[in-house]
Image (cartoon, rainbow, N blue to C red):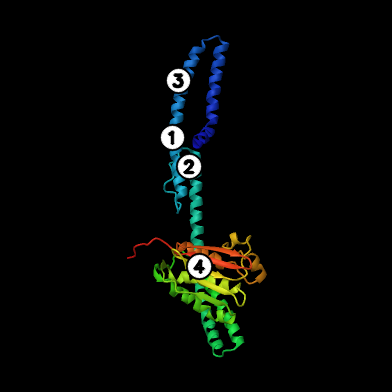
Amino acid sequence: MHLFWNYIKTKKGSIAVFLLCCGIFCLIFYLYRLPLMAVGYATLLSGVCCLALLVWDYLHFREKHRILEQIQQELHITLEHLPEACTTLEEDYQTLLHDLFRQRQRLEQDWQGRYGEMMEYYTAWVHQIKTPIAAMRLHLQAEDTPQNRALLEDLQRVEQYVEMVLCYLRLDSDSTDYLFAEYDLDKIVHQAVRRFSSQFITRKIRLEYEPLHCSVLTDEKWLLFVLEQVLSNGLKYTPSGGTITIFLEQPQILCIRDTGIGIEPADLPRIFEKGYTGYNGRTDKKASGIGLYLCRRICRNLNHTITVSSQVDVGTVVRLDLHRERIEME
């Protein structure tokens, strides 16, 4: 009905002209004392013909509208299915659309070329910078001193930020390297905990963890990245002597709970926004606001969900729902 009234609005000029002509005929017949019945019959017949023409034109209009809506819903917009132009004005509009479409294609190709070059550069940069990082790690591990342990922790943060750069770029890439399979969740958790083992020891943070005895359908590398981000945040905001607990809720919800400073209630709804640091981040001055954003994006791609509940001065619980329908893998 909304479409019909929109169509009537486009034809209101023609309808007004028809009614004005009928009024003029009636006025002239009245002034010349002619029988109004004659003009009444003529008006009725003309009205029926105009109504039939209006219905036919409306059906044609509705079909065009349907085709244009279908084109709008296509993922890659093309101009192959545009309805045939019936007037010079429609031909002008379609010529304009073709010009804009060709311009859009040129801009898209230019952007893809620039993006590809940027991806190649940063990928090469990440692999190149890993070499001096590995060398520095070997030098610092040669002597076990408090200063070297502190430098190793800083170096680990640098390495983590480098991985975040590569992950951020790959998320928007056309090609992905997801490899879905059944993985032992304990093995993935062990890898994440092992990476931060020195920080647990240095900061005297207790780890409470019991075997999960659970297998999940996921991508090991990307899920490991999410777990490392969550553990890194937990360690960052948990004071010395605190506890980080890893446990499983049914059916397959992995929970990571810390006894840290917690998150302000006003910040909770926005912690997954890109670049949002919240009160804790502004106080700490070191938060990037990218970690949890990447975690949410990765979980969506893996068909997992991540949620956070927190209470100030009590702690935070991050829940990763890893349950998904089984699929047949060939």
Q: Position of residue 170 (x, y in %)?
A: 49, 67
Residue type at numbered disc 4: Cys
Q: Nearer the viewer, mark 4 or mark 3?
A: 4
How far apart, in angstroms, are the residues tagged by discs 4 and 1? Answer: 58 Å
Q: Which residue is mark 3?
A: 45
Q: Residues within 10 Å of mark 3 (few under 14, many from 20)?
A: few
Q: As displayed, is residue 99 above or below residue 198?
A: above
- Note whether residue 164 is visible: no
Residue type at numbered disc 1: Leu
How far apart, in angstroms, are the residues tagged by discs 2 and 3? Answer: 34 Å
Query: Given the current orientation, which residue lies at the most extreme right position?
Result: 283
- Note whether residue 283 is visible: yes
How far apart, in angstroms, are the residues tagged by discs 2 and 4? Answer: 61 Å
- For label 3, the SS is helix
How far apart, in angstroms, are the residues tagged by discs 1 and 2? Answer: 20 Å
Residue type at numbered disc 2: Glu
Asked if the residue under mark 3 is in contact with the one under mark 2, i.e. CB atoms within 8 Å, the reply is no
Dividing the image into 4 quarters, which one contains the C terminus?
A: bottom left
Q: Which residue is mark 2?
A: 91
Q: Nearer the viewer, residue 243 or 71?
A: 243
Sequence-wise first label, 4 or 1: 1
Q: Which residue is mark 4?
A: 255
